[in-house]
Amino acid sequence: MGHYRRVFFFGIVRAITCLLVWNVTVVAAQAAAPEPVDWIVTGKFVVTMDASHRVIPHGSVAIRQDRIVGIGPAEEINARFQAAHTLKREQDLIAPGLIDTHTHAAMSLFRAFADDQRLQDWLTKFIFPAEAKNVDREFVRWGTELACLEMALAGITTYTDMYYFEDEVAETTKRAGLRGVLGSSVIGFPAPDYKSWQEAIRGAARYLDTYAHDPLIVPAVAPHAIYTTPDEALRAAHDLAVKMNAPLLIHVAETQKERDDAIAKRGMTPVETLEKLGVLDGRVVAAHCIWVNDDDLEILKRKGTGVAHCPSSNMKLASGIAPVTKMLKLGINVGIGTDGFAGSNDSADLILEMNLAAKLQKVATMDPHSLPAEQVLEMATLGGARVLGLDREIGSLETGKRADLITISLAHPNAVPLYNLYSQIAYAAKASDVDDVFVNGSQVVSGRKMLTLDAEEIYRRAEAYHLRVINSLR
Amino acid sequence: MGHYRRVFFFGIVRAITCLLVWNVTVVAAQAAAPEPVDWIVTGKFVVTMDASHRVIPHGSVAIRQDRIVGIGPAEEINARFQAAHTLKREQDLIAPGLIDTHTHAAMSLFRAFADDQRLQDWLTKFIFPAEAKNVDREFVRWGTELACLEMALAGITTYTDMYYFEDEVAETTKRAGLRGVLGSSVIGFPAPDYKSWQEAIRGAARYLDTYAHDPLIVPAVAPHAIYTTPDEALRAAHDLAVKMNAPLLIHVAETQKERDDAIAKRGMTPVETLEKLGVLDGRVVAAHCIWVNDDDLEILKRKGTGVAHCPSSNMKLASGIAPVTKMLKLGINVGIGTDGFAGSNDSADLILEMNLAAKLQKVATMDPHSLPAEQVLEMATLGGARVLGLDREIGSLETGKRADLITISLAHPNAVPLYNLYSQIAYAAKASDVDDVFVNGSQVVSGRKMLTLDAEEIYRRAEAYHLRVINSLR
């Protein structure tokens, strides 16, 4: 038998075998008892945000352990799977959990503490002094609990943090049952957790090691910004991130002053500075990126750097308007961030941020077609996952992905009638419409109640910190 | 006795008499039984928005019939008054009811129906055709019920409407128990209610007469805009408004096109056009006022014309950014409007609009001090009342004013801790935090439940209209 004949023969045999095996599998599956799963969650619609943006009317999601194992019409899923627990929300839509790409969770204890200020004043006159006097491990624990409570109730399943005592943030986030990309801060002056950037780098190394294989926590390193963190520290942070294969979180080109100072001192924009330092790559999550020119955008695109757009913060601190429409057209990955709670924003509400992000781009470009509802929902889900390098695991509802999902009630006057699901989510839904939240296959919110944290205890602690903060500044 | 001695003598007598009368009154008040009132509402704070912006910790509001008869510390009010009904919300703040200065309520049935469009396209390609095919008296009734349900649950106690079949809007609003400044539309083409503007003027005259002395309804006339309504109709509408002492509601300088067309056709801006037509005065509520120059602002100020600023709508339709900061500095009265539900906004949420208005001005002026929280709350309450000419009756919590008030829960993670009440309301509160709503002394919302309307029936009707609208456009 010549080579080609042999190939042909074995090809035929293989094809027949495949067909037989497939048939047997199908028949067996049909005859066999339904596969056991942990959860079947059913809703009026499933908004998958998968590659084809499939929407499934009266759809279900089957969950086994931490993964989605089936998704489709309710009848099909219920025939295929036998669930230990079922959640039927006939008046809700099911969507991927929302992904917050930039915040400082523990700052919730400073909520609305220094409002209506410019970023530089806000940082140097209010926040840094208040942090120096108040932030310790215990503060971070309760501030993070409060933030997790608020975020979970608002449908945020993954959040991205830059703060101090980040191992405490990680432990609290695990206790809350949320997913976190949690960055240990590196900054050029004594911080509440580490007295120097060298100490901060050593601390970050230990922290990255501890949480390297956590199912919920993606540990990251978070040098604050080029104007607060020495170049050497930025490089050291990046070296560590590369060595540990971790994300690097940083504020970039947030204010005109940051951009102007960089040009005056270095002859380079903040983005060029980071590129020159060798810090910019696909593992970087660059928060804000407002004062970026076309060359900067080209660099971000080329380096695969993701952007965390924070509309509330950028508007409220009068930092400016990020060219998000342009970024998206260039194919830069852009997610949405709520930013901190203390003046830059006063709540963690990604549904509100979607609303703002879309409206802000429309008026900034004077084009109502800019950033339509469907695209802004993508930014808050799969787009955010891409920014964090987690898009193979989260961001859409697909078989094989982690089961991070939320249900959003449609039984509210603001959801009636329903002409367009994406518009409904981006422009009309409220954080309070979120009924249930699952993260990594576990339910953390049920019927608007947090299952994993004690809200009353958190409120008591927050009130005590409130008094302490006020007294500390007298 | 000389003249001066006589004056002195009678002065002394009068002073002694006054002192005696005062003493007797005080003693009698102390000894007498407390005065009977219908309601005492008690909260953790009362945010009055009175002239001194007084905030009363642990405060109460006493209501008799439709008026506030007492306001102060809870102990004092409880000692002075005996209430038939009490509402104790120890975890809530009490605030004036929110005032929406511009919307089209019945358009709720078109919610999110034509999103991400430019105003002219949106009107001519989507809204006007859909209205022509669907809007009748019954549509207006159910659309208004749906809107009233949503507005009341979001803490809006007074709203300003421009639509068709306005007597139906009035009846529905009365049934809902809300306060409405409700404008009967006048437009230069056949509308769902009247086939010509002359008919519309005659209809408006009858409508203004019918509701002239209603406790809840302030009937108004609402010529649509200079680009849709003939000059003759604008003048006739104004004459009618003057004759009946009614507000006149109109869209002004909403888009660049409206401004440019006016200048091209008339050699005047839209504001100048209205002034020239003799239409502009203190009874006019001018919605939007985005494309206004300094001369226009001077005219608005001089004429005492109030402005309804609609941030969501202006951003979403990419109409532009109104110079609100400048208007307020000039002393122009500016309120906030949610605008319609069908593309220009998709929900009626004045708390969200406050949030947007403040943030939009900060970024537009690149000054974070622009439109601080306290000022934006004033816009949504007393400022709105001034725009509507109702500031002697509503807009703040003061003895003698109508009892229009809301309670906002502080027992939410987004309200903890509480450093600043105004920031809390403007930047962190959610519509869903509104627990109770009183309008004209009657409770219409209790613990987030609407008392006056049947939500389930409204949803059923809205769903039927949804199908009808979709089919009508096939």
Image: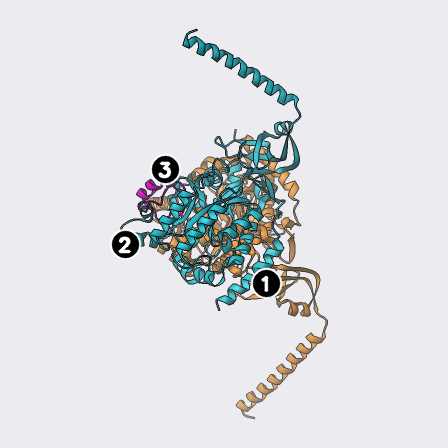
Chain colours: A cyan, B orange
Q: Chain of mark 2?
A: A
- Distance between mark 3 and mark 1 Cα atoms: 50 Å
Contact, mark 3 vs mark 1 (Cβ under 8 Å) = no
Residue toward you, B255 or A67: A67
- The amino acid on which the numbered mark 2 sits, given as a three-letter code, is Ala
Q: Which region of the structure is painted magenta?
A: A276-305
Residue toward you, B388 or B2: B388
Does the image show residue B345? no
Contact, mark 2 vs mark 3 (Cβ under 8 Å) = no
10 Å crowding of disc 2: few (<14), some (14-19), many (20+): few
| Side of A109 relative to A191 (left or right) | right
10 Å crowding of disc 3: few (<14), some (14-19), many (20+): few
- Pointer 1: what residue? B45
| Side of A252 relative to B67 (left or right) | left
Q: Earlier in the sequence, mark 2 or mark 3?
A: 2
Does the image show residue B428? yes
Q: Is residue A80 above or below residue A113?
A: above
Q: Residue furthest bottom?
A: B1
- Pointer 2: what residue? A264
Q: Is residue B399 above or below residue B213?
A: below
- Pointer 3: what residue? A330
- The amino acid on which the numbered mark 3 sits, given as a three-letter code, is Leu
Q: Are marks 3 and 1 on the same chain?
A: no
Q: Chain of mark 3?
A: A
Residue toward you, A14 or A162: A14
